[in-house]
Image (cartoon, coloured by chain):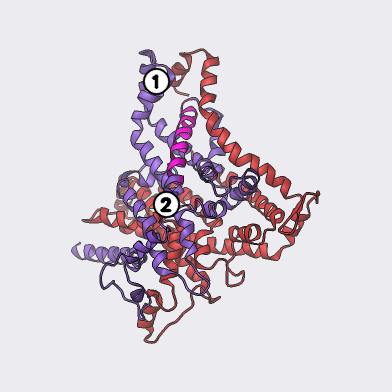
Chain colours: A purple, B red
Amino acid sequence: MKRGLFWRYVAAIAITVFFLFPIYWLFIISFKTPDEIFSFPPKWYPGQIHFGNYAVLFKDGDAVTVWNSLVVAGVSTVLAMVFGTLCAYSIARYRTGGDNFANWIISQRMVPPIAIVFPVFLMYVKLGLVDTYLGVILLYTAFNLPYVIWMMRGYIQDVPKALEESALIDGCTRWQVIWRVVFPMCRAGMLATAIFTFIFAWNEFLFALVLTRTEVTTYTVQVTHFFGGQSNFWAKISAMSVLGTLPVFIAVAFMQKYLVRGISLGAVKG
Amino acid sequence: MTIATATLSKRRAPVGERRFKYLLVAPAIFLLLAVGIFPLIYMLVVSFVGIDMMAEDWTFRGLDNYKAAFADARLWQALGHTLLITAVALPLELLLGLAMAQLFLEKFPGRQIFIALLVLPTVVSPIVSGATWSLMFDNRYGPINQVLGWISGKEMPLLWTIDPTLVYPAIIVAEVWQWTPFMFLLLLAALSNVDKSQLEAASIDGAGYWTTFRRIVLPAIWPVMAIALLIRGLDLFRIFDIIWALTKGGPGTMTETLSVFTYIKGFTQFEISYAAAVALIIIVLLTVVVTWALKKVQIAR
């Protein structure tokens, strides 16, 4: 038994090293001086922690793309949560539209983004919405709606109907039932769904690549701007990537409990 | 319908009820239609005319763009590349994820910390993970060639993102690295829910490991596994970010997938009408597959 445990640890550590090493590499490159980045053979750890690469991002104005990501992901998350949760309530409680409607919603989630963004781009060119916050936020909101509806439908179904019953009998209006009974009961689920929605929008690349030029470029698009024909700006690529990745890691650390349900579209209630 | 809903819906007049439930879905539906359906109709129109970089030609051309698409060897190759990546990466992610889930199924000290750390690749933005792997694969300053050099005892300046024999392994490694933890998490949750008493009964009856796995474990985890495969399969079918960061579809058009091909046609070569036709073909194809798959896999419980 003891020996079994030993080998289990060996395997667990080996696997974890494989999956974490690339992230470690990304992080340490962002703390290396340019000389260290381009030294051969490569250095496996930085001589000292050096924040110069981050300073350059702020000095050159690249860091503003993180702000753009925050605005776009934040606003679209709030909108998707409001509209999506109301819609989810209707579907969960009244079976609005039946199974076909619910299936249509989830199939919207599965259409390839390139096929969604191409017509949207053509439309936006006509409407002057390319490279505007409004344009990107609208698309992100619509794209994340099916996810919010689907997840919130599940969480709302978990709220006992009897509670709503008694609230109605006590004289609450339907809006009050939603606001005072349903929302508080699935607050944790709502928070988890909102955080996932935010992460999806935050990490999104293709829509932003197509719909932004200079004004509302998000951090994911900015990372690819540092790829050059001759040489890549590794320092900037890594520092920018870390700026975009760290918030996600922190968010995920706080929601281990909802992680599996969140990424499996509610199929597994961890 | 349970008794509770029946009474709930009797509380108000049916008309008010109906208005209320449609009022709730209206904003969401409006947005989905505005951003989803109207542009789609617009794109359908565009796919029947001849807009490109040179001219905004709105004369009706019938099915010319569709005929051109079906005759385009590059499009078929892109479909082939997409299916190849899916066919290799999906089973790899499943098997590795399953093996890892087995390893972490039993409780041992520190298990939760390992699991929390193993999640991280999956939540990294795919474009960032592509960038990370291009750092890893760098021919001179990347750690992979360095390690290969130690093993082989001589310098290994392999051009992972340029050499035609190495680009696919590079893409698959990055893809499998990012999404195996996804499979792992879902399968771990599924395995933890397998009925322990059945497993005990099987071991008392003297069933071997594989028999138990095939007869008891697999049927129990199949619903979750099917959903995991569906989600990942569809994601792989539309793969874009990792390839964009690693190869941009190159060398030449060797790693162009459907998404990359459509992007290049539409946004770098500006064959607008042609790309519209291709995008519609992809939508139709995917809708058929998704509808079929959703019927098979009861994601809705």
The answer to which image quadrant residue A157 occupies is: top left
Q: Residue at x 41, y 45 (%)?
A: A196
Where residue A145 sits in the image (x, y, percent)?
Answer: 50, 39
Give the CA separation, mark 2 to mark 1: 46 Å
Q: Identify residue for label 1.
A: A176
Where residue B59 sits in the image (x, y, percent)?
Answer: 81, 49
> What's the amino acid at mark 2?
Leu
Chain under callout 2: B
Where residue A61 sits in the image (x, y, percent)?
Answer: 42, 58
Asked whether residue A71 is drawn in magenta, I would say no
Chain under callout 1: A
Residue toward you, B98 or A149: A149
Q: Identify residue for label 2.
A: B218
Q: Is residue B77 above or below residue A84?
A: below
> What's the amino acid at mark 1?
Gln
Q: Secondary structure at mark 1?
A: helix
Dominant SS of magenta comes to helix
Side of B32 where B269 appears, left or right: right
Q: Which mark is residue A8?
A: none
Q: Is residue B10 above or below residue B97?
A: above
Q: Secondary structure at mark 2?
A: helix
Side of B106 where B243 appears, left or right: right
User: Which stretch did the figure color magenta?
Assistant: A72-93
The reply to whether residue A82 is in sight is yes
Asked whether residue A86 is drawn in magenta, I would say yes
Residue toward you, B272 or A160: B272
